[in-house]
Image: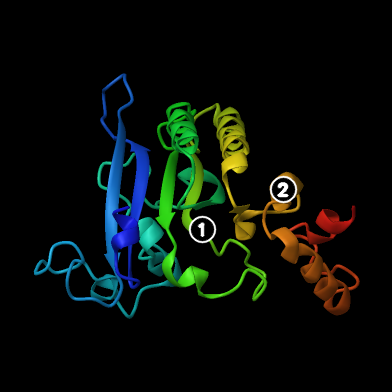
Amino acid sequence: HRAQAMPRDCSSDCFLYFADESGGAARHLRMNVSDYAYGAEQDPFQPPAPAKLLHSRLESDLAPARLMLKEPYLSEQPEGMVHRGFMPFGARGFFVRAAFISRDTASEFWQLLLESVLDAPTSHCCIHLQHLGGALADQAVTATAFAARAAEWSAVVTGCWPTNGDDVSAREAACTQWVKQTIRKLLPHSLHTYATDLGPGDEEFARWAYGSNAKRLLQLKKRWDPQNVFGKGFPLVELCSD
């Protein structure tokens, strides 16, 4: 309800993550809520406190790899998070999938979400609830390929593991399986999946991505790419083959 009350140029994200508490045997789950005021000079809930504006921290001579770190998904992650950003490159591996959630999602979904993050195989894993809503619903479901017009949240499930040590493959397999299993649990309560994260081996989740728009996309695919030259990404042909 708090997020839904915000102005249309503002949003409120939520992180479920494990605290970076070196030396402690037990994992401590935390929740962080971050408000974003795009182009504003005041916090939407604490007027007259100034908002943290992203553009004020950008530098014109940043290399592309460094500029990437200024993207809010990375640079605004909460302090104390075990995995924070992607640097140094190669130090951690990632596997990410996401599902879109409506504002009327049943309470069972939130219980599943909490249970899932507590079952994460490493403390580097997290779940990020990205706030949507607002202008997203201004267009009809059939206006574009994107079908999740009623979404209020994107539940981004991130499996993350250190790439050093002797058991990297096992950690990667465990985190990948955790992400897939979490999405499977959330799908019955979800609107759609996020297509951009999906690859050729994701037919299971791809079926949830575009809804009734998938057939129209396939028609365009057959017209503009009849040889399936661009067939290494989203499995659209396989999705509509049946």
From this view, report whether residue 215 is shown above or below residue 171. Answer: below
Q: What percent of the width, then of the height, locates residue 119? A: 48, 26
Q: Residues within 10 Å of mark 2 (few under 14, many from 20)?
A: some
* Residue occupying image coordinates x 48% and y 40%: 106
Residue 217 visible in rendering: yes
User: Could you give the CA–CA distance between mark 2 and mark 1, rounded to whole angstroms?
Assistant: 21 Å
Kind of element beneath mark 1 = strand
Q: Residues within 10 Å of mark 1 (few under 14, many from 20)?
A: many
Q: How many marks?
A: 2
User: Which residue corresponds to mark 2?
Assistant: 202
Frontmost of labels 2 and 1 is: 1
Q: What percent of the width, then of the height, locates residue 220? A: 81, 75
In the image, taking residue 151 as reference, residue 206 lies left or right, namely right
Residue 233 visible in rendering: no
Display colour scheme:
rainbow
* Residue occupying image coordinates x 63% and y 64%: 147
Amino acid carrying label 2: it is Asp
From this view, report whether residue 39 is shown above or below residue 191. Answer: below
Lower position in the chain sequence, tag 2 or tag 1: 1
Residue contact at pointers 2 and 1, CB within 8 angstroms: no
Q: What percent of the width, then of the height, locates residue 69? A: 38, 62
Amino acid carrying label 1: it is Ala
- Which is more toward the observer, 29 or 134? 134
From this view, report whether residue 188 is shown above or below residue 111. Answer: below
In the image, taking residue 74 as reference, residue 168 lies left or right, namely right
User: Which residue corresponds to mark 1?
Assistant: 151
- Which is more toward the observer, 169 or 223? 223
Q: What percent of the width, then of the height, locates residue 27? A: 33, 25
Kind of element beneath mark 2 = loop
**Residue 55's mark?**
none
* Residue occupying image coordinates x 49% and y 48%: 155
